[in-house]
């Protein structure tokens, strides 16, 4: 279907909202990077149909007045201006644009653009037979219209995101940040992902499997991680948040003597992915935190937490300048 030529609106909102993050200045990738190529599929943003022109009927999305379910791109741009509290100055947040591609009245994918219309995230939705609710199309239209998925929480948001099949995220400099394929969902709403993460210099950061829900992450399966210089950092096996085996290396390739976890027992020294310095050493028994967790800063002991079978015991003991 040929798309409407109406320009999608830019609402200026003065709402009581909770700000979750601010975007800093960016560096941009080359015009010929992957993001630019992907945006060629969308065409001119000025010719993308505004999402408010769609309505849900019979479990599908329709353009008002049309006789066939909608196929094509829709979009909505948000440029939020608000106060964080009464008496505070109003301020603006960077523009964000959300696009979605429909096929036969069904949403197939979603894309988020930054203030310069550069692609930040691309999500491919699961097929219709994998969606949980019969009303998922109307729920997604509500989500697009009310700002679900924005970097801040707005009053009056409603609607839900569809189940996802795979997604890709990019850093501000144009390099890939994360790419994941969804393997399955569990009863708690977590999705098992087969993923690859990258450092901002293009080196792989982590590869493996984990369970994710929003920003929450539970390792579950094999995991290999790397330092920013490309050197292998760790090789791990997890069982839904419980370590089974873990091996760690230093930035120079030497084996980390502070880490030895086998059959859920031992110690794990979590090393900084940039300089390789030890940040925390955890103790485990039967896959649960058991014993001291010792935190470090600049090589000096910072704090100690005590655990018994996965539960915190007593108060945290702080050292040095944190006393």
Image: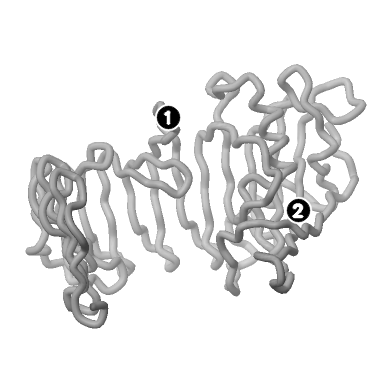
Asked where in the image residue 81 lies, by quadrant, the reply is: bottom right
Residue 248 visible in image: no
Q: Is residue 81 left or right of residue 5?
A: left
Residue 287 on image: x %, y %: 16, 42
Q: Is residue 212 left or right of residue 125?
A: left
Q: Is residue 146 left or right of residue 63?
A: left
Q: Is residue 243 left or right of residue 172?
A: left
Disc 2 packing (10 Å; few <14; some 14–19; many ≥20): many
Which one is in front, 220 or 84? 84
Which one is in front, 121 or 312? 312
Which one is in front, 62 or 37? 62
Residue 29 visible in image: yes
Residue 101 on image: x %, y %: 70, 38
Q: Which residue is mark 1?
A: 185
Name the residue at 67% across, 31% down: 139
Query: In the image as oriented, which residue stretches furthest toward the bottom?
Result: 321
Name the residue at 31% across, 71% down: 274
Q: Which mark is residue 77?
A: 2
């Amino acid at each position: 279907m040929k798309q409407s030529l109406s320009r999608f609106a830019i609402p200026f909102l003065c709402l009581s909202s909770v700000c979750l993050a601010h975007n800093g200045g960016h560096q941009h990738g080359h015009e010929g990077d992957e993001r630019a190529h992907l945006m060629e599929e969308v065409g001119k943003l000025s010719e993308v149909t505004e999402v408010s022109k769609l309505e849900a009927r019979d479990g599908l999305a329709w353009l008002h007045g049309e006789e066939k379910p909608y196929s094509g791109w829709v979009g909505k741009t948000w440029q939020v201006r608000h106060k964080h509290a009464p008496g505070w100055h109003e301020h603006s947040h960077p523009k964000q644009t959300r696009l979605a591609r429909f096929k036969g009245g069904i949403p197939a994918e979603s894309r988020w653009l930054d203030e310069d219309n550069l692609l930040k995230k691309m999500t491919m939705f699961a097929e219709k037979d994998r969606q949980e609710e019969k009303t998922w199309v109307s729920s997604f239209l509500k989500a697009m219209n009310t700002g679900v998925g924005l970097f801040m929480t707005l009053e009056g948001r409603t609607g839900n995101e569809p189940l996802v099949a795979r997604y890709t995220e990019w850093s501000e400099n144009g390099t890939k940040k994360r790419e994941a394929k969804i393997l399955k969902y569990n009863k708690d709403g977590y999705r098992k992902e087969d993923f690859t993460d990258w450092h901002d210099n293009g080196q792989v950061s982590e590869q493996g499997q984990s369970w994710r829900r929003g920003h929450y992450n539970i390792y579950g399966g094999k995991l290999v991680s790397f330092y920013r210089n490309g050197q292998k950092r760790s090789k791990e096996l997890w069982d839904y948040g419980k370590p089974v085996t873990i091996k760690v290396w230093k930035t120079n390739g030497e084996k980390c003597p502070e880490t030895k976890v086998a059959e859920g027992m031992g110690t794990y020294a979590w090393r900084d992915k940039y300089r390789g310095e030890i940040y925390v050493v955890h103790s485990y028994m039967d896959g649960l935190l058991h014993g001291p967790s010792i935190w470090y800063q600049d090589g000096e002991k910072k704090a100690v937490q005590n655990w018994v079978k996965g539960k915190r015991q007593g108060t945290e003991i702080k050292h040095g300048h944190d006393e």
